[in-house]
Image (cartoon, grey):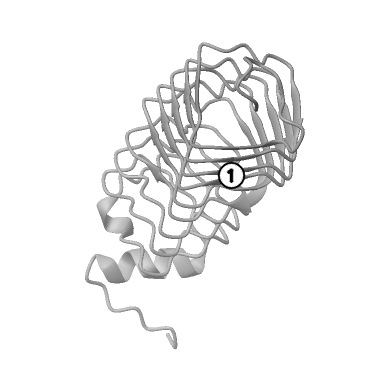
Amino acid sequence: MSDAVGEPAPDGEAAGRHFRDEDWYGEDLGAVRFVDCTFTDVDLSEITTAGAHFESCTFHGGRFNASTHRSTAFVACDFRRVSFFDATFEGCKLLGSSFADCTLRPIRVLGGQWRGVTIRGANLGGLDLSGLDLRDADLSLSSLARTVLRGARLDGASLRETDLSGADLRGATLERVDLAAARLSRTRLDLAGAVALAEQHGAEVDASA
């Protein structure tokens, strides 16, 4: 963006800028690139991005409601009090980004890499996160009740006091995950997950039996 409010720069790039109280509702931002930018109370509802790149950006307040992002990267971004109601992320990278006091449901997630994200104390209940790469994510104290995590990559994820009631973890990779620290009730596990949970509770599993 240029210095003029709401006007896209010819090259679609910005660095070190602060955008405040702007209305970008419904804009097609395409493959824009923002680095070290701050967005305060910016309305990004119904925007579309494709191959965009946001790096080390901070979002305070504002809305991404009903927005659509395809192959877009949010790297080491900080989202605070942001609404993502009905947003779609398809094949996106949210590497090392953090979310605090954000509205994250309902959202639609179709694959992608959310490795190292911090989403503590959030309500992610009932979402379909099948196949999502959540390695090394911090999901502590969050609700993933009835969340579908089939085939997700959860290696190294923190699930301390995470509510996994009714969640589907079949096919998920769980290396270095302490399932015993999570709240489990009617949680669906495949054999590998059940064995890992049993061993964390002190059982000796005899695979030859």
Towards the viewer: 180 or 17: 17
Residue 6 in the image: above or below residue 87: above
Q: Which residue is found at the position 56% from the left and 56% from the top?
A: 133
On the image, which quarter does residue 152 sit in? bottom right
Q: Residues within 10 Å of mark 1 (few under 14, many from 20)?
A: many
Q: Which residue is found at the position 33% from the left and 50% from the top?
A: 159
Percent across and percent down for residue 171 are 57, 61
Residue 45 in the image: above or below residue 193: above
Residue 64 in the image: above or below residue 112: above
Percent across and percent down for residue 114 are 53, 50
Q: Which residue is found at the position 31% from the left and 44% from the top?
A: 140
Percent across and percent down for residue 153 are 53, 60
Towards the viewer: 8 or 54: 8
**Residue designated by label 1:** 129
Percent across and percent down for residue 188 are 49, 51
Q: Amino acid at mark 1?
A: Leu
- Quadrant where the N terminus is found in the figure: top right
Q: Residue furthest front?
A: 3
Numbered disc 1: secondary structure: loop
On the image, which quarter does residue 165 sit in? top left
- Quadrant where the C terminus is found in the figure: bottom left
Q: Is residue 19 left or right of residue 2?
A: left
On the image, which quarter does residue 207 sit in? bottom left
